[in-house]
Image (cartoon, helix red, strand yellow):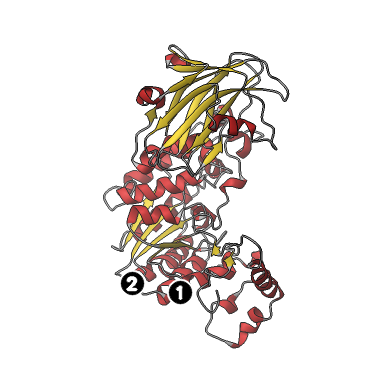
Amino acid sequence: MHYHKPYTDKYYYTLDNQRSQNDGICRYFDYDALITGTSMTENFKSSELDEMFGVHSIKVPYSGGTYKEINECIARAKAYNPNLKLVVRGLDPGMFFDAPDRMRTDLGRYPAYLYDANPFNDVEYLFNKDVIRIAYTMIKADEAEGFKPGITSFDKYAWWQQLCNFGINTVLPEGICYSGAGEPVHLSDAERSVIKVQIAQNVTDLADEYPETEFYYFFTPYSVAYYKDLVEEGTIYRQIEAERAIIELILEHENIKLFSFSGIEELVTDINNYEDITHYGAWINSFILRCMHENKYRLTTDNYQAYLDAELDLLLNFDYNSLNGQVDWADDFYPEALLNAFIWQVEPVEVLNTYRDSIELSQAELMSGQHDGSEGVRCTGSLPYASAADAGTEEQILRDEFAGAKIKIQDIGKRHYLIFYGKKGTDNAEPAILIDDGEYRKTAEISVNFQDAEWQQYIVDLSEAEGDLTLYFCSESAGEGDDQASEFIYSDIVLY
């Protein structure tokens, strides 16, 4: 990609090296919008930006990137592509006090030879053993049976969410101990001067150079746990004063729309949204895009003072020790399911009531007064246990040899999660669920244990399914070789 657009009709290109591949992406791809920033922007989906804003975007993040590095990426992209009309960029609060020319020299040798106009130092690219190895592997790959050419999607490029766990037990497994606010430390004149140079050089000058381009910038919303040490040190005043200076510098520029979500208490205080004290789940990236589209949480000359006062008040007065008792959801994607209604403007649907006319029951019955008084379905039968190597359960269900409820859903639309509560009626029972849209058939993976007969919450990811669905809720015997009748009850079944 250093010399031409990828030949995606012939080879498969894996996007997995930001600092070596991003420049080629900016140089040769077709786009009119881009997403960039640190790892806080890696979980954005360019397809969501495209759908919400009517653009065709690329995603070119720089993990750990400084303001200078990210700004230079945008500048090169605009130089390569004059049609660039929209930029989404994160501004990390942890880098407010960086020197304007700081680069991440601690990440290994920087491939500057890819970005300059000197053709002679390209020898470092042309005779790079890693490049030669990758090229050879790609050439040989297209000889394999069933090979499909293409490229990593920008939704999946740099996507790290699937590698992580979320919640207080992951972020602060040993708990948190807050000792109280320290003596105030304020922003110095020297620091204010550095910030002024930093923001002009690496944020606002580029916007002035290209007034026809819209820049959607946002402060990346770290969790309250990040700010605990700053409050104890008293440097939280310095941090908020730096933020104030940056906001005032940015708001002078009409083609920059500046957003901040750090004052949303229910977001930044819920550690279920985070995999560490700063990195948030992809649902927050989706939430940010929707807020930008709806012009929510935008900072203006009229509201930024009140926003800063509220943010400081939250951070100074928050009960940090209360995080120790916070619920850590059994399924990490429960917060995403709850946000989906806002992100995609779709209301949750109560399945048993809404689709009652489509329900088929086999060895099952509808029951009132189940979880939290809601309706449920009790499934009985002896559906055999399916081992990892045996698709017997799925095959039986699709032959309509199921013991439970079959429910037809008309057009799932943008509803991405099925949430319900379940409990055993017999000790040998386990939930068995299948989602079928004609093409997409998936036996739902249940991520929580079911060792007792109490109600437990279950979440099924439906984000890859589309159109009309048929949902099967069954009871499965809990052990291989167990053909005794089992009973499992499903209740409070909702599509989010």
Q: Which mark is residue 210?
A: 2
Please tell me in which quadrant of the rendered image residue 12 appears.
Answer: bottom right
| Horizontal arrangement in the rendering, residue 140 relative to residue 473 (left or right) | right
Q: Which mark is residue 252?
A: none
399 above or below 64? above
Residue that extends furthest to the bottom in the rendered view of this protein: 120
Q: Amino acid at mark 2?
A: Tyr
The residue sitting at 47% across, 20% down in the picture is 361
The residue sitting at 38% across, 70% down in the picture is 206
Tell me whether circle 2 and circle 1 mark residues in contact (CB < 8 Å).
no
Provide the residue designation for mark 1: 76
Q: Is residue 446 in view?
A: no
Classify mark 1: residues with Cα within 10 Å, few (<14), some (14-19) or many (20+).
some
Q: Quadrant of the N terminus?
A: bottom right
166 above or below 111? above
Q: Earlier in the sequence, mark 2 or mark 1?
A: 1
Residue 228 position within the rendered picture, expressed as x and y whole percent measured from the top left: 55, 40
Residue 45 position within the rendered picture, expressed as x and y whole percent measured from the top left: 46, 53
99 above or below 439? below
Q: Amino acid at mark 1?
A: Arg
- Look at the numbered disc 1 and give the secondary structure of its residue: helix
Residue 264 position within the rendered picture, expressed as x and y whole percent measured from the top left: 41, 40
Residue 489 position within the rendered picture, expressed as x and y whole percent measured from the top left: 53, 18
Cα separation, mark 2 vs mark 1, equals 12 Å
Q: Is residue 288 in view?
A: yes
- Look at the numbered disc 2 and give the secondary structure of its residue: loop
Please tell me in which quadrant of the rendered image residue 474 appears.
Answer: top right
The residue sitting at 43% across, 59% down in the picture is 89
* Number of numbered labels in the structure image: 2
Please tell me in which quadrant of the rendered image residue 344 appears.
Answer: top left
